[in-house]
Image (tube, rainbow, N blue to C red):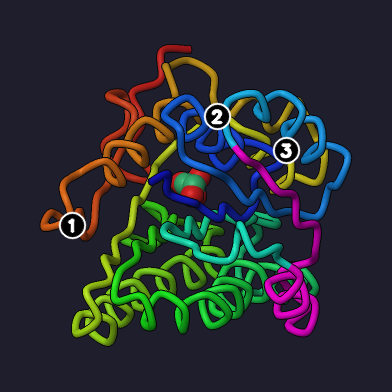
């Protein structure tokens, strides 16, 4: 029987690339995000391959999260795989100059949103005594870099939640793991720098960054392991990256 995966943040970047590779491999999909048009476009592209349902809601809004989950049609109600991918960075200012709205957005989406959707889905995984949760963390969840402050804090929280989920859900046979990417060229930096494309581009210049597809392949590898194998915590960086601050740029 085909598995069903729910992917948050599926309208772009790693989430969208993961939806595509899952569809290529026969995993039915619930694609979630705020941008309905983009999600419907993706649905059109993939619906010949798998059953695919769109849920558009704001993950920061806890009642919207539970309402969206409750609205799932019967055929999508058994979720085997949860990809906690929705996440954003906003700003790269030193702590004394940070924008409080940016801080709220990062904590609300990256930490609280992840908790809300997990809280909605975990009970059915417990009932079924099976399931897999992949939390998309970051190298920023393993180390802190200048200006990273609250983004790094939010991803350190994801790291802690990942470990805690694995401990608490161990007794139910639910697999929990994190994939922590370093520099991946997506809309990530455009969002971080509030639409400043030139500044965003500079982040990925002078070396070869990861692509969303590189990370999606690893996510698919993780979900396609036999049931007794759990990739608990994985860091992936471009070959040219050694840490958050050491990148072999040839400019
Ligand atoms: C993305 C990695 O180093 O740009 O999560 O913050 S970094």
The residue positioned 70% from the left and 65% from the top of the image is 72
226 with respect to 70 (left or right):
left
Q: Nearer the viewer, residue 149 or 35?
A: 35
Whole-Å distance between the Cαs marked 3 and 1?
Answer: 33 Å
Whole-Å distance between the Cαs marked 2 and 3?
Answer: 22 Å
Graded by Cα atoms within 10 Å as few (under 14), some (14 to 19) or many (20 or more), the crowding at tag 3 reads some
- Residue 160 is a magenta residue: no
Residue range of the region highlighted in magenta in the rendering: 51-71
Residue 5, position as x, y percentages in the image = 50, 52
Considering only order in the chain, which callout, 3 or 2, is on the residue closer to the N terminus? 2
- Mark 1 near ligand 1 (CB under 8 Å)? no
Considering only order in the chain, which callout, 1 or 2, is on the residue closer to the N terminus? 2
Say which element carries label 3. Answer: helix
The residue positioned 57% from the left and 52% from the top of the image is 7
The residue wearing badge 2 is 20
- Picture quarter containing residue 161? bottom left
């Amino acid at each position: 029987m085909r598995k069903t995966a729910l992917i948050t943040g599926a309208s772009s970047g790693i989430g969208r690339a993961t939806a595509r590779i899952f569809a290529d491999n026969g995993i039915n999909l619930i694609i979630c995000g705020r941008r309905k048009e983009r999600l419907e476009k993706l649905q059109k592209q993939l619906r010949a391959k798998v059953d695919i349902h769109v849920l558009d809601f704001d993950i920061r809004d806890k009642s919207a999260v539970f309402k969206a989950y409750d609205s799932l049609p019967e055929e999508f109600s058994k979720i085997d795989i949860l990809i906690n991918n929705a996440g954003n960075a906003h700003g790269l200012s030193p702590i004394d100059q940070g924008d409080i709205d940016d801080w709220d957005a990062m904590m609300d989406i990256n930490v609280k949103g992840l908790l809300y959707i997990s809280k909605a889905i975990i009970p059915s995984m417990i009932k079924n005594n099976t399931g897999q949760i992949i939390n998309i963390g970051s190298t920023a969840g393993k180390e802190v870099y200048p200006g990273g402050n609250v983004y790094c804090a939010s991803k350190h929280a994801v790291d802690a939640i990942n470990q805690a989920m694995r401990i608490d859900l161990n007794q139910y046979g639910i697999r929990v793991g994190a994939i922590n990417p370093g520099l991946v060229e997506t809309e990530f930096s455009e969002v971080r720098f509030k639409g400043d494309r030139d500044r965003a581009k500079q982040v990925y210049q002078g070396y070869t960054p990861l692509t969303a597809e590189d990370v999606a392949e690893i996510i698919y590898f993780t979900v396609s392991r036999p049931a007794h194998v759990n990739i608990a915590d994985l860091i992936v960086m471009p070959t040219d990256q050694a840490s958050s601050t050491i990148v072999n740029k040839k400019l």
